[in-house]
């Protein structure tokens, strides 16, 4: 009988031997070209000037030679369309990361009896090979926030409630807010919830850019996990 | 293990046979040697069938194998499944002055 990589990973787990970069790269592969493309697209859509778009559409509809009528001409409806587009692109980014990871499988937009979960991350047997996932149990939640505002304490507290309702003790908070170092209120909140058994890993554009530049998803996730546990001042999104 | 040549490949089964160890003991010793930085795992597809367009030689980077491979008999080996990757070990560190 041959010795398979699966056996090696199990033996390493048993003997507490850390996985090297090559093994992590095998367990999580990200299409960085596609990720860069999606991040560029996200930025382009965010830079849309909704007022100018709405005004241009109204003017086009009024033009006598207009063959095609724009339906969304009001500022609010153009803003809504932009938000939806940003949400769709960010969802694709999250899916791209999760789909490339061999240690878990994902289901998006799950409606449960109490809420709608953006991403349900089911952890396979090999998830135990990743130190940060050893205490995660059978599943994690992924929550995506695509707002241009900064991180909010309410997002963290709400997510803890959703985790409680879904028998979950680990989650990833994917945030598309502008990159910044988290303030003490957020760091403290995350650290206290982690001490209480609810681990929320913030994951923002800073981390996505790192992955697009070649760093492994699981390495970045692990580092964020440790930063939350230690309340590291450098914890950023 | 320290007597191994730099390019010599050690498989757990042959290692166990050579030193009269059980399969579990052999695997444990080899993993300890990896932990000590003495050995490095090498990988190839876990199949005896010929692979189309590949010699299926050992590689230090398992990510090279993480795709579907067509076999000579018309089948497919999924390199993304860790069960389909065979592992052996290669000497990496210098011990007792030997390269």
Image (spheres, coloured by chain):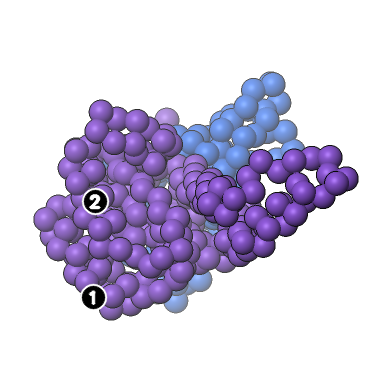
Chain colours: A purple, B blue
The N terminus of chain A, quarter of image:
top left
Label 1 crowd bin: few (<14), some (14–19), many (20+), radius 10 Å: few
- B1 lies left or right of A112: right
Real-space CA distance between mark 1 and mark 2, rounded to the nearest whole angstrom: 18 Å
In terms of secondary structure, where does tag 2 sit? helix
Check the residue under mark 2 and report the chain it is in.
A
Check the residue under mark 1 and report the chain it is in.
A
Q: Give the vertical position of A88 relative to A175 (above or below).
A: above
> Does residue B81 show up?
yes
In percent of the image, x 44 and y 76: which residue is there? B97
- B50 lies left or right of A185: right
Q: Give the vertical position of A216 relative to A88 (above or below).
A: below
Residue in front for this viewpoint, A162 or B84: A162
- Image position, residue B98 (x, y; %): 47, 72
- A195 lies left or right of B3: left
In terms of secondary structure, where does tag 1 sit? helix
Residue in front for this viewpoint, B4 or A95: A95
- A160 lies left or right of A38: left
Residue identified by numbered label 2: A158
Q: Tell how many labels.
A: 2
In percent of the image, x 29 and y 49: which residue is there? A171
Residue identified by numbered label 1: A184
When asked about the image quadrant of residue A51, the answer is: bottom right
The C terminus of chain A, quarter of image:
bottom left
- Image position, residue A184 (x, y; %): 23, 75
In percent of the image, x 46 and y 63: which residue is there? A148
- Give yes or no for contact between labels 1 and 2 (Cβ–Cβ under 8 Å): no
- Image position, residue B17 (x, y; %): 37, 40
Q: Give the vertical position of B65 relative to B84 (above or below).
A: below
């Amino acid at each position: 009988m041959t010795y398979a990589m699966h056996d090696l990973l199990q033996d390493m787990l048993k003997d507490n031997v850390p996985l090297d970069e090559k093994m992590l790269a095998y367990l999580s592969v990200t299409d960085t070209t596609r990720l860069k493309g999606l991040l560029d697209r996200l930025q382009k859509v965010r830079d849309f000037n909704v007022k100018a778009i709405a005004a241009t559409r109204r003017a086009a509809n009024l033009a006598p030679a207009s063959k095609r009528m724009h339906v969304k001409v009001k500022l609010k409806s153009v803003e809504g369309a932009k938000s939806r587009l940003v949400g769709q692109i960010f969802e694709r980014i999250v899916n791209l990361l999760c789909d490339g990871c061999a240690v878990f499988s994902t289901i998006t937009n799950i409606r449960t009896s109490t809420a709608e979960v953006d991403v349900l991350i089911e952890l396979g047997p090999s998830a135990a090979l990743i130190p940060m996932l050893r205490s995660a149990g059978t599943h994690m939640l992924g929550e995506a926030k695509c707002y241009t505002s900064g991180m909010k304490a309410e997002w963290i507290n709400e997510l803890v409630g959703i985790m409680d309702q879904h028998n979950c003790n680990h989650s990833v908070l994917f945030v598309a807010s502008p990159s910044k170092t988290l303030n003490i209120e957020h760091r403290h909140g995350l650290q206290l919830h982690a001490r209480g058994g609810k681990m929320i890993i913030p994951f923002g554009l800073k981390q996505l850019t790192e992955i697009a530049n070649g760093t492994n998803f699981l390495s970045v996730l692990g580092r964020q996990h440790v930063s939350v546990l230690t309340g590291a001042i450098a914890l950023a999104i | 293990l320290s007597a191994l040549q730099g390019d010599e490949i050690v498989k757990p089964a042959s290692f166990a046979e050579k030193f009269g160890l059980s399969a579990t003991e052999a695997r444990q010793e080899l993993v300890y040697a990896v932990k000590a930085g003495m050995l490095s795992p090498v990988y190839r597809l876990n199949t005896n069938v010929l692979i189309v367009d590949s010699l299926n030689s050992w590689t230090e980077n398992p990510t090279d194998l993480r795709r579907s491979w067509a076999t000579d008999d018309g089948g497919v080996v999924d390199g993304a499944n860790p069960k389909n990757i065979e592992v052996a070990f290669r000497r990496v560190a210098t011990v007792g002055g030997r390269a």
